[in-house]
Structure formats: C-alpha cells, structure tokens
Image: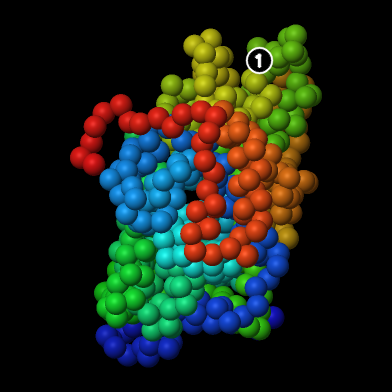
Amino acid sequence: MTATIHTVAAEKASGELARDQQLAWKLAELATRAKDAPQDDDAVAMAKNRIIDNAAIALGAANESAVKVARSDAMGSKGTGKATIWGLEDTFAPVQAAFANAVAVRFLDNDDCYLAAEYSHPDDNISPIIAVGQHLGVSGADILRGIVVAYEVHVALVGTGDGTGICLHKHKVDHMTHIAAGTAAGISSMLGLTTEQTYHAINFAVHNAISSRQSRKGDIGAQKEFVPGFSAEISIKAVNHALHGLKGPNPVYEGVDSIIRRFLNGRDDENAVYKVELAEPGVDALRNIMKTYPKQYAFEYQGQAIIDLALQLRAQLPKKGDSVDLDQIDKIVLETSHHTHHVIGTDAQDPQKIDPDSPRGTLDHSIMFAIARCIQTGEFHKDRAYQMTPAEKDELRALMARIETQFDQRWEDLYHDQDPNVQAYGGRMIVTLAGGAEVADEKTRANAHPGGDTPWQRPDYEAKLADYTKELVSDAERARFIQAVDGMDTIAGDELAKINLIVDAGNLEAPETRGIY
C-alpha cells in the first residue's frame, strides 16, 4: 500500500497554503486520476449491491409523508431531463430526481453506514451520481467508478484508522459536509473533469453543506431525512458551476475563515491538526467501500448488534404460550459504549425515547425501544416494528421503563479501536428475571457486518429488495432490475434508464395537500 496520510491544518495567514497542499486539491487529484486507473472488482460488485439496497429502502419508504412530498416536488420537472425516480417510468431533471431519491433512501434509516471519527451513511452519494449519469448519458462503468470514488473520499474524511478523519459531530456540525465532498468528487470523476474543475466543485460543495445537528435533536422532523437531498442538490450545482470555470471558496478546509478555523477544532486551538489517509489511484485499489457496512434493520447503526443480541437472548427467556412472559422480566441492563448510552440510551435523559407514542424518527434512535420490541415480538421489521396496537404500546411502555443502559469502558475502547478487525459497536446485555436469575450474553458486531457472524452477500441484498418491495413491484420487474444492475458495465446513454425499479404491483401515493410545486 502507498496510501498517504495528509496533514490538514488551518492557515495562520490567508494565502500561505499552496493549492497543491490543500485537502480539496488532494481529493480532486484522487478523483481525477481514478478515471485512468483499473477498478477493483470487489469494489465495483459492492457498488452494485448498494444500488440494489438503495432501491429496496427507497421503495420501502415510498409512501411515507416526507418521501411523498419530495417526490411530488420533482413532478414539475417531468420530461425535462433523463434522470429517473425510484418507482416511476417517467424521467426528470437531475437535481429534482436526485433530491427525491436521496430523501427516500434515507427515510427508513436503513441505509449503509461507516463510523470512525465521524458518522456517515456513504450511500447518500449514490442518488445524485446516478441522476447526473443518467441525464448526461455517460456509461454505466462511469457511474460505478463515480460511486466507488465517492465512497473512497467520504470514508477517508470520516477516518480510516491511526487517528485519521475529521470529526464534525463534536462541534454539532451535521455530517452533510462530508457527504457533499464525496458526491462532488464522485460526479467529477464520473464526468472526467480536470483536477482544477474538481477542486472547485469540492470547494463549492463543502462550503455550502455546513449545517447544524439540530435536525437530530428535539422534536425530530423531516429535515433529518432531507439532509442527503439538500446535499445532492448542493453537490450537483457545485459540479455544474465548476464545469463553467467558476471558482469555489478556497481553501475550503484550511482557510482562515473556513471550516477548520471557524467550525471545528480550530476555533479553540489555532494549531489544531487533522489527518486524512488517501489512496494513490493507479497504485492502490480504491476499496474504502469494502469497509462500509449494510444495515439489516431500520434503526441507527449502533443498535444493529444490540438488536441481533436481543433476538438471540429472547430464545432463553420464560414464555407464555408463543410469547415471552414480560411480567417475568425484572430489569434489563445493557453495558455499552458512550454513544449508545448517551445518545440512544437512558443517559440521553429523553422521555420521548421510552414512549412508544413518539414519532418513528425518535424511536429508531432509542435502544430501549429496539430491545423491548425485539423481546416482545421476536423480530425487528422495518414496518411491523413501528406499527403497534394500543395493547402492545402499554406492554412496551412498561418494559422500556425497566431497561437501563450503562457506560462500560471496554465497549468504549472497542468502539474507538483503530483496527477495523477489532472495532465493534455492540454491548453486553443482562436480563434479570423475577426470581433473581440472570440471562446474559454479548455481541461485538452486527451479524451483517463484514466482520460479523453472517456477513451480507448478494443474496441478502436481493432478499431485502424482495421483502421491501413485495407490495409494489412484481417478481418479473424485480428480476429485470437486478439483471440491469449486473450489466451496468456494458450500457450507456438512454439505456441507463433501466437502472430503476418500476412500481407495477401497487400504488405510489401523492401528498394529501397541494404545495407550491
């Protein structure tokens, strides 16, 4: 490996940092040089898997309110471009299609993840790359390269070990900033832009993608799902403007009034330094996509292993008929990392996280809900988990109140371990029964994780697609779509419209009210 760790620090005086030493330039070099470098077969195959995953989760959320609104917003552009929207036969303008698709993909919180110095859903990059590629009629191979490059950049910014990565959440900056960098780099690589153009595309995108994490606090609303849509819109426009020779704000990371100095560690320490590890295209295979992990469950990633663990322990709990006798559970303690305890656990001190009447956007970030629902039902399905009868809610409310999370340094150390073969996002669960007996076990990684008990392979993605689209898409259409994705390497131009899954066995609903569009 010849990957290089780049030191990134704010300028002391404006203009002192040469352009070729700026992080945005380094990212641009990676993106543009990837065009002439051989692609890694595993990375390309994984990009195809994630396109299939996007189709599954986008159509699985197709008739949710925020998704219906985002799709409705795009209708005014019907016929004005060649980009597709999941489920529809028509074509649309690329920005509008990318926005609608990105919102649909994110809604269920069931898209892929990568966690290091920062949190991320790297497949947020896929919707705008496909939309622009379809609209401009590039080749399917170009789209796949763009996706691989976007993942490469996105994961590098999030961190790849040895203290690398740029943490945003510590400063209450939303992770859209890193999404936009990855998308701008990916689209630029797909289109064969110069390093100069790509550099300015990244500068534009990163600068305009700074937002706060308030979208993930309080009474959580649609902004949480809209974040990747806004990032897609910003990134597509950034590349468009760079194509016209326009210059973006620079240095976007290191400038005296830019990201590091005004939003991140540089606010308090003018000598703050970040490190970002970048591969050498043509020498190193671009394989950061292989480090990312799919989500089996529609729940925040830190809960994936815990859900597997709760389902595993359920088999050992006392039963009443086919169900667990919830009255026999005295308490449940989860020993885990700071994030799981503080953000989605009892240390969040958020009464909404133990109230089954809370909105889905809150419940899919409550580990108490996930544990209780798994024990109550024996599954955690994207729909059924959140569809509860009044009686089930009463049972859940009582059980959730008996669940406690505790910080444990061992799990915190595993959470932050820089070795991907050691790093883990799990915990140890102890269920104390009414008579005092305990049932306990632990799990380091989710089963679907690349290092888990049953790492996901292509059949798992296809099974997820079948489950999530069974009410909307026929078996024949699903098979056609999978075949089209598998053959992406050999298609181009108008044939790229095949990279879409058409609803032909159900209905896509419209919003109940009329908006501006």
Disc 1 residue type (three-letter)? Leu
Viewer can see residue 70: yes
Q: Is residue 497 above or below residue 1?
A: above
Q: In screen coordinates, is 236 left or right of 41?
A: left
Q: Is residue 5 above or below residue 468?
A: below
Looking at the rendered image, the quarter that the N terminus falls into is bottom right
Q: Quadrant of residue 280?
A: bottom right
Q: Position of residue 474 (x, y in %)?
A: 61, 33
In the rendered image, the residue lying farthest to the front is: 494
Helix, strand or loop at mark 1: helix
Q: Is residue 477 above or below residue 227?
A: above
Between 324 and 197, which is closer to the camera in this rendering?
Answer: 197
Q: Residues within 10 Å of mark 1 (few under 14, many from 20)?
A: many
Q: Quadrant of residue 270?
A: bottom left
Between 42 and 256, which is closer to the camera in this rendering?
Answer: 42
Residue pictured at 38% horizontal, 88% vertical: 19
Q: Is residue 47 above or below residue 444?
A: below
Q: In screen coordinates, is 290 left or right of 218?
A: right
Q: Position of residue 372 (x, y in %)?
A: 60, 25
Residue pictured at 37% horizontal, 41% vertical: 71
Between 244 and 135, which is closer to the camera in this rendering?
Answer: 135
Q: Position of residue 78 (x, y in %)?
A: 33, 47
Residue pictured at 35% horizontal, 42% vertical: 70
Residue pictured at 42% horizontal, 55% vertical: 83
Q: Position of residue 401 (x, y in %)?
A: 53, 22
Between 128 and 359, which is closer to the camera in this rendering?
Answer: 128
Tag 1 residue: 326
Q: In screen coordinates, is 228 left or right of 279?
A: left
